[in-house]
């Protein structure tokens, strides 16, 4: 009977043409002044978010989320695109969502993928910085332990080019043709208060590759700040992996962050394989923030220095 109620609730959320009872509009705008060989003013980010929820009764809530983003950060595309769009229900049984949504790599990468630009490189090796397209995911939390199961239906996972640190957009087969498929994800996370530990395994469609991608990591409270560790492995036989370490702590009313990513999977043709970041970020008010970042990528000729200001609405 409960399965019938859940199925009916999903159908109601998807079929409803009316505005949900609790609907909000928000987003973020960020402007960056960068110097990497030459100085440029960069409209670094524009995100528009619409989310809504409604009480469906029987202890269940229906919800929907849409995020449109234009992000010129190195790990993102530089066009306005549909970053996430999904519907779902949640209740005592857990949470079920359908659509374009994030994977659960943040369980392992949340402590190291913390910088404005040139961030998440190790995470990208083990999780391919992927959003899940045409996916259904199930999430359940029990006493500090959270697990996620996900499956795409003829959907894609964004691939990752570690050499130039970009998402290539869609997986390809051996002939270089687009190859969406039935990719599966399983992830676990444990929050112990003073520490967290988590990981994700992605199993691509066998027509794309037989290698599983793995990312594991966690955080620990240390010396008034948070230390993050991440290990990513793309499953290749040539030990194509990477590690990341990052530390963040309060300083002068803001947050100072330092970190480094290094590993064989990040190497370019010259054998350079490290990316170091130092960043300071501070809130200027309820919605406004500002910061500076120095990013030294050994694979690039010039280091990146930037100052930025952003506004959340």
Image (tube, helix red, strand yellow):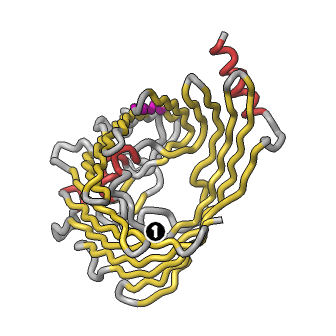
**Residue at the image point whose x is 80% and y is 35% from the top:** 16
Answer yes or no: is residue 202 visible: no
Among all residues in the image, which is located at the extreme right? Answer: 18
Which residue, given by chain and number where applicable, does mark 1 sit on?
Answer: 73
* Whole-percent x, y for residue 6 in the image: 66, 21
**Residue at the image point whose x is 49% and y is 76% from the top:** 290
* Whole-percent x, y for residue 298 in the image: 22, 73
Query: Measured along the vertical axis of the image, is residue 230 above or below residue 286?
Result: above
Instruction: Residue 20: say if magenta.
Output: no
Answer yes or no: is residue 312 visible: yes
Looking at the rendering, which quadrant does residue 79 occupy? bottom right
Highlighted range, magenta: 145-150
Q: How many marks?
A: 1
Query: Measured along the vertical axis of the image, is residue 28 above or below residue 122?
Result: below
**Residue at the image point whose x is 28% and y is 38% from the top:** 211
Side of 66 relative to 201 (left or right):
right
Q: Quadrant of the C terminus?
A: bottom right
Q: Nearer the viewer, residue 194 or 79?
A: 194
Side of 69 relative to 186 (left or right):
right
* Whole-percent x, y for residue 1 in the image: 67, 9
Q: Secondary structure at mark 1?
A: loop
Dominant SS of magenta comes to strand
Among all residues in the image, which is located at the extreme top? Answer: 1
Query: Measured along the vertical axis of the image, is residue 238 above or below residue 145?
Result: below
* Whole-percent x, y for residue 296 in the image: 27, 75
**Residue at the image point whose x is 41% and y is 52% from the top:** 129
Side of 120 relative to 14 (left or right):
left
């Amino acid at each position: 009977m409960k399965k019938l109620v859940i199925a009916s609730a999903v159908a109601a959320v998807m079929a409803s043409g009316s505005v949900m009872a609790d609907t909000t509009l928000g987003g973020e705008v960020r402007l960056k002044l960068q110097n990497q060989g030459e100085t440029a003013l960069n409209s670094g980010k524009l995100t528009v978010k619409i989310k809504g929820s409604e009480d469906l009764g029987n202890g269940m809530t229906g919800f929907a989320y849409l995020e449109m983003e234009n992000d010129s950060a190195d790990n993102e595309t530089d066009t306005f695109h549909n970053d996430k769009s999904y519907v779902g229900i949640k209740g005592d049984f857990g949470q079920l969502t359908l659509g374009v949504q994030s994977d659960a790599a943040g369980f392992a990468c949340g402590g190291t993928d913390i910088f404005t630009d040139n961030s998440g490189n190790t995470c990208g090796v083990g999780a391919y910085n992927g959003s899940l397209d045409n996916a259904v995911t199930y999430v359940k939390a029990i006493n500090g332990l959270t697990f996620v199961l996900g499956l795409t239906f003829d959907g894609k996972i964004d691939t990752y080019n570690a050499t130039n640190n970009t998402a290539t957009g869609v997986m390809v087969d051996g002939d270089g043709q687009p190859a969406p498929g039935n990719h599966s994800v399983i992830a676990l996370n444990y929050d112990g208060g003073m520490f967290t530990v988590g990981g994700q395994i992605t199993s691509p469609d066998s027509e794309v590759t037989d290698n599983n991608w793995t990312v594991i990591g966690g955080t620990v409270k240390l010396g008034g700040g948070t230390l993050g560790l991440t290990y990513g492995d793309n499953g290749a036989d040539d030990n194509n992996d990477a590690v990341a370490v990052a530390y963040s702590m309060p300083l002068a009313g803001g947050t100072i962050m330092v970190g480094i990513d290094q590993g064989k999977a990040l190497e370019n043709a010259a054998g350079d394989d490290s990316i170091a970041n130092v960043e300071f970020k501070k809130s200027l008010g309820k919605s406004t923030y500002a910061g500076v970042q120095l990013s030294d990528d050994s694979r690039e000729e010039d280091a990146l220095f930037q100052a930025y200001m952003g506004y959340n609405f």
